[in-house]
Image (tube, helix red, strand yellow):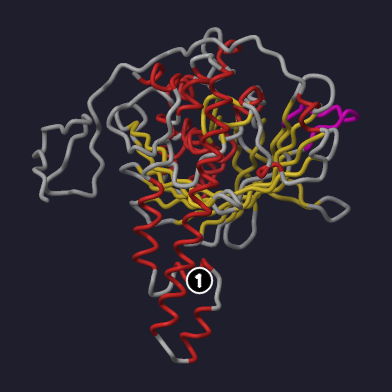
Amino acid sequence: MTQDIPTTGESNSRGHYQADSEPDVIKKRLPIVRRLSIPPKPNISLNLWSIMKNCIGKELTKIPMPVNFSEPLSMLQRLTEDFEYSSCLDHAAACQDSLEQMAYVAAFTVSAYATTAVRTNKPFNPLLGETYECDRTDDFGWRSFAEQVSHHPPACALHCESNAWYCWFDFSMTTKFRGKYLQINPVGTCHLVFRRTGHHYTWHKIPLTVHNIIVGRLWIDNSGEMDIINHNTGEKCHLSYKPYSYFSNEKPRRVTGAVLDKSGDVRYVLNGTWDDSLEYAPVVSTRHSRNGKPVLETGPARVLWQSNPLPPDAERMYCFTRLALQLNEPDEDVCPTDSRLRPDQRLMEAGRWDEANRAKVELEELQRQRRRQMAAELAAQSLASSKQDETSDTHSKSESSVSEQYNSQSSPSASNLQSRHVNTIYVFCINSIIIITA
């Protein structure tokens, strides 16, 4: 079935401008009025230790948690929130010097951790096949799409693009509860390409630690080493996120780094904190001290990135930034699998936590049923395929894993099977959902 596409200057039902001569160029959507608040967080207490005490040493992504410890956003939305400070990438795209461009890319990677200083609640684990589409071309100039592509282990993929750059992530994580703290180790690679130059950057996210699980106020520390690589020029940026120490006089949440040219010489020095700001200073001269270590003399420092203040009453709204407040606002034109349509998350945002917990349990049980049914149907397809082919190669293939079968000759039907199941990820009967979505 064909669909008429509006010509340049006309907008479609979602308010997007389409280009007839340059279909790959992103056109801004019409300005829309966005919400500035959400219902306040209910004052409902629940002892975290009562749940976590049986989870020591376990992989927490496999353990169901009540919404009481969550925020009303999914991990797909939380990843999209990395682009709140996309202006860093816009500045980077305008740079004529690739080393200065690297400094702005580094600032963008640091900015993604800013909200973790005050956001200690976990996002919802997306269901298999859950998606999230975000179009902010009217104000930020980018649009993104994310999907949960694996359940165990949990993994998602995200693509975000503007007229000047495009970016894609594959993201998973491992978690371990060590008694007093929870450690989260991201797995996956972040990619960034600038359209004008084709410069391709990659980096990996650093570990995150949640402290005071047993007693006290929860707080998060980001620590580790990050390398950002420009694969076109061989230039690199090394960032060091300093771990918090009770015995150190250093400013907490500190980040230091250096931008190195392809010869390994330091050209810019970076300094700041991951919750507030990052600045850079050019290296004007280098000399060696008596112990042989290089001493760098730098010029005046300039700010690369500065965090935005939180909205009024942010503490009553999960300490959300302005962008976070808008990520879950309803949009009638999104896919039926979009996170905005997830009933338990919507109920939680409305302050109806008891109903949200019941909905969450039912959604997770339905997901387990779908996975069992899909595995059984794929196994049946595999068996039927193996009986039709008597060659030894096909016989060997019939004994391979389900994932191998999915990618073999039966993949088209397997793909259709997955689509049929994914389209029903939120379908179940619960009276409270009818009320909240009416």
The residue that appears at 63% across and 24% down in the rendered structure is 119
Q: Is residue 262 above or below residue 172?
A: below
Magenta-colored stretch includes residue 244: yes
Residue 118's quadrant in the figure? top right
Q: What residue did someone put label 1 on?
A: 404
Question: What is the span of residues highlighted in magenta in the rendered image?
Answer: 243-253
Q: Amino acid at mark 1?
A: Glu
The C terminus is located in which quarter? top left
- Within 10 Å of disc 1 (Cα), the crowding (few <14, some 14-19, many 20+) is some
Residue 428's quadrant in the figure? top left
The residue that appears at 83% across and 33% down in the rendered structure is 53
Q: Position of residue 28 (x, y in %)?
A: 25, 33
Q: Is residue 241 above or below residue 227?
A: above
Q: Is residue 136 left or right of residue 383?
A: left
Q: Position of residue 48 (x, y in %)?
A: 76, 25
What secondary structure is found at the residue carrying circle 1? helix
